[in-house]
Image: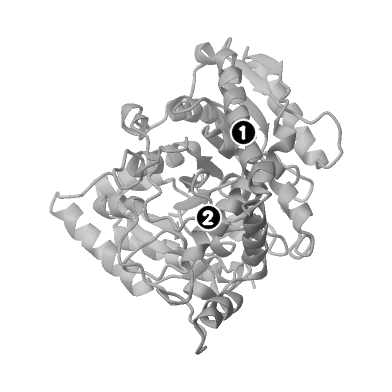
Amino acid sequence: MIEKSALEHSKALEKGEYTAEELVSSYLDRAKACQPLEMFNDLDVDRILEKARAADKRRKAGKAFSAMDGIPVAIKDNICDTEEKTTCSSRFLENYRSPYDATVIEKLKAAGVILFGRTNLDEFAMGSSTENSAFRTTRNPYDPERVPGGSSGGSAAAVGSMSAPLALGSDTGGSIRQPASFCGIVGMKPTYGKVSRYGLVAFASSLDQIGPMALNVEDAAFLLSHIEGKDARDSTSHPYADKYPTSGTVKPMTAKDLKGKKVGVFFPQSEAGFDEAVLKSCEDTRNWLEKQGCQVVNIESRLWQYSIPIYYILATAEASSNLARFDGIRYGTRSKQANLQEVYVRSRTEGFGPEVKRRILLGTFVLSSGYYDAYYNSAQKARRMIRAEYLDFFKDLDFIVQPTSPTTAFRIGEKAENPIAMYQSDLMTISVNLGGVPALSLPLGADSEGLPVGMQITAAHFEEDKLFRFAASLEKDFAPDRSALLKKKYS
């Protein structure tokens, strides 16, 4: 049963081939078998089964809420849900319960979706390996000695191990796409403003975006179509989110559609910093594009090489501001100190992990007197230039294709002591967030050890439908074989 797609589950539930309770039970069994991968911060079995039985009653009465009624979706543990703790994988919020639902959670509940556990992440979504969680280190389903990527590593591993058919992640600099690449699944960052951020615990508000993670392109579109839309509670939510809705079903582009499509490729020309398997996947992708009659154009960016410093100025500055609300007074960890100043200092010292502290310090520095113009203001100007460059690219191009990550999944602990090396994991993804454009990671190959390689496809703002159709065409010829995964035994 767990080999089927979410859309196949939807049709099977409608026809009565099996019940929602049977469906979630099969995923709970799989999640139990994959427990050593440490994907979930919480998996409330009783609640999940209760919601599944309620979905079955609605189906039986002919009152299903939507096509997604009864389908399980795992949720990254930085998206607020009144019925579950929202910890952000941080000691600071270890026992925090949100008084409200995030907009995406409201939409999923209204659709009858079974919220299938809270997935692990790098603390406050700050990281690229899910090693920065205060609670556990999530492992890659293809090789448990390797990382699943981050910060949405728990969601990626849950879908990649087939412990859940769908999941939500959040993406600030590649946190959906990079773990999707490492875990051999589809991960999609929508256009900024396409999905409401209301109820997403903020890291960097001008970059954060919630998006779908799935085993295939059509399922990712299916989930996105249920969570997108303009939201008055999010001032950055865009009216075009309603004007250009995502179709719940995807028709791959035909040979006629593909012929003549202008595709810009940004493929590395040397092996410096890029795995041989990634370079091979680039070559295979180019050959496929040319075979379909696409017009393949090598593109060069004047600015992408500066993406990492621009990002780590802007993102840390916003993190420093956003995390100021965690003061030990209103909610979260509170140190037992008599002096108010000491409460602030000790609560944050005890509650935040080293990577979060590092980014708060960086952000406070770039916002400090005498450095604001030199760093933060300059980075804002550079971000606008990157956005303008994307607009120029898409005047002539239909898509941009490049590797999602320079490497396949690296070993746990390999980069933990070297933050700069860790930051380089997002080399190919960060510019997408700075430009606000939609991008999708698609599994398009594997290395000699069977570790997945992801290719990133980018389209113009609010062209998600076009992006899904193009990706689905590629997927037909490059779909990974997951049979070996199902036989894996974890211990």
Furthest residue toward left: 61
Residue 23, how many percent across, how many down? 36, 58
Q: Which mark is residue 203?
A: 2
In this rendering, the answer to whether 109 lies above or below 14 is: below
| Disc 2, SS | loop
Residue 30 in view: no
| Disc 1, SS | helix
Residue at horizontal 71 percent and vertical 44 percent from the top:
309
In this rendering, the answer to whether 454 lies above or below 399 is: below
Tell which tag, 2 or 1, sits nearer the viewer.
1
Residue 115, how many percent across, how many down? 36, 60
Q: In this view, does 244 lie to the left or right of 317?
A: left
Q: In this view, does 200 lie to the left or right of 112?
A: right
Classify 10 Å Cα crowding around label 2: few (below 14), some (14-19), many (20 and above): many
Query: Which quadrant: the C terminus?
Result: bottom right
Residue type, mark 1 in image: Lys
Sooner in the amino-acid sequence: mark 2 or mark 1 = 2
Residue 385, how many percent across, how many down? 62, 28
Classify 10 Å Cα crowding around label 1: few (below 14), some (14-19), many (20 and above): few
Q: Are marks 2 and 1 in contact (CB under 8 Å)?
A: no
Residue of label 1 = 381
Residue at horizontal 35 percent and vertical 50 percent from the top:
104
How are the colours assigned in the image? one colour
Residue at horizontal 55 percent and vertical 65 percent from the top:
39
